[in-house]
Image (cartoon, rainbow, N blue to C red):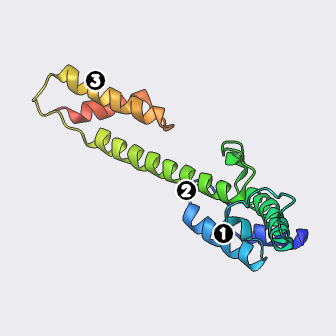
C-alpha cells in the first residue's frame, strides 16, 4: 500500500498555494480510489468510551487509519518550499481547509499586487493636487507592493514617476 500511495502521490500535481482547485480535485480522486477519503468526507468521530458498539469502534478505527494515511498523502503532495509555511494539524480535513484558505489568501494578494502594479505604471499627474502629493502616492503604492513580497527597484519607481508627469 505504501508504494501504491507514493506512486499515486507522484502522479498528481503538487500544491503550490496557487492551484488549490486542481490539486484538491486530484487528491480527493486519488484518496477515493484508494478508499482513504473517509477522514476527508466526515468529521472526526467522538472519542471512544466503554459504551460504544462494535460498529462505532470499527468506524473509529477506519477513520483513524484514513486520517493518518490521508494526512501523510496530503503532505507528500505539497511543494517543499511551502511545507513549513502551512499550519500544522493532526486532521486531513482541516489540512484541506487550511490549504484552501492559504490559496485564497495568496490569490487575493496576487490580485491586489497586480492591481497596485497596474495603478503605479499607469498613473498620470493631472494637476488636481501638488506634485509632491502625486509622487508621495506613487511612493506609497510602491511600498505596499514591496510589503506584498514583490520588489520595486528605486530606479524603476523614478522612471514611473517621470513618465507620469506631463511633458
User: Residue 145: which quarter of the image?
Assistant: top left
Q: Secondary structure at mark 3?
A: helix
**Residue plotted at (61% across, 51% down):** 98
Q: CA distance from mark 2 to mark 1?
A: 23 Å
Left or right: where 88 falls relative to 143 = right
Badge count: 3
- Among the two numbered marks 2 and 1 on one chain, the one whose residue lies closer to the N terminus: 2
Identify the residue under disc 1. 41
Q: Is residue 152 visible?
A: no
- Nearer to the camera, 72 or 81: 72
- Among the two numbered marks 2 and 3 on one chain, the one whose residue lies closer to the N terminus: 2
Identify the residue under disc 3. 136
In front: mark 2 or mark 3? 2
Q: CA distance from mark 1 to mark 3?
A: 52 Å
Q: Secondary structure at mark 2?
A: loop
Which residue lies most toward the front here? Answer: 51
Q: CA distance from mark 2 to mark 3?
A: 32 Å
**Residue plotted at (87% across, 59% down):** 50
Left or right: where 48 falls relative to 151 = right
Quick one: quadrant of the N terminus?
bottom right
Q: Secondary structure at mark 1?
A: helix
Left or right: where 143 falls relative to 19 = left
- Among the two numbered marks 1 and 3 on one chain, the one whose residue lies closer to the N terminus: 1
Q: Considering only vertical position in the picture, is 135 above or below 93?
A: above
| Mark 1 nearby-residue class (10 Å; few <14, some 14–19, many ≥20) | few
Mark identifier at residue 18: 2
In front: mark 1 or mark 3? 1
Residue 48, image x, y percentages: 82, 58
Amino acid at each position: 500500500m505504501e508504494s501504491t500511495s507514493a506512486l499515486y502521490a507522484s502522479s498528481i500535481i503538487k500544491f503550490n498555494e496557487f492551484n488549490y482547485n486542481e490539486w484538491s480535485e486530484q487528491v480527493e480522486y486519488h484518496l477515493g480510489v484508494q478508499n482513504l477519503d473517509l477522514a476527508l468526507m466526515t468529521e472526526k468521530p467522538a472519542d471512544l468510551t466503554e459504551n460504544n458498539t462494535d460498529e462505532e469502534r470499527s468506524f473509529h478505527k477506519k477513520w483513524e487509519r484514513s486520517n493518518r494515511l490521508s494526512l501523510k498523502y496530503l503532505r507528500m503532495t505539497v511543494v517543499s518550499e511551502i511545507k513549513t509555511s502551512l499550519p500544522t494539524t493532526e486532521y486531513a480535513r482541516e489540512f484541506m481547509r487550511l490549504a484552501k484558505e492559504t490559496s485564497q489568501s495568496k490569490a487575493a494578494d496576487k490580485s491586489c499586487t497586480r492591481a497596485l502594479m497596474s495603478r503605479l505604471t499607469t498613473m498620470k499627474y493631472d494637476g488636481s493636487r501638488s506634485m509632491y502629493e502625486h509622487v508621495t502616492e506613487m511612493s506609497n503604492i510602491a511600498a505596499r507592493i514591496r510589503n506584498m513580497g514583490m520588489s520595486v527597484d528605486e530606479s524603476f519607481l523614478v522612471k514611473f514617476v517621470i513618465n507620469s508627469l506631463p511633458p
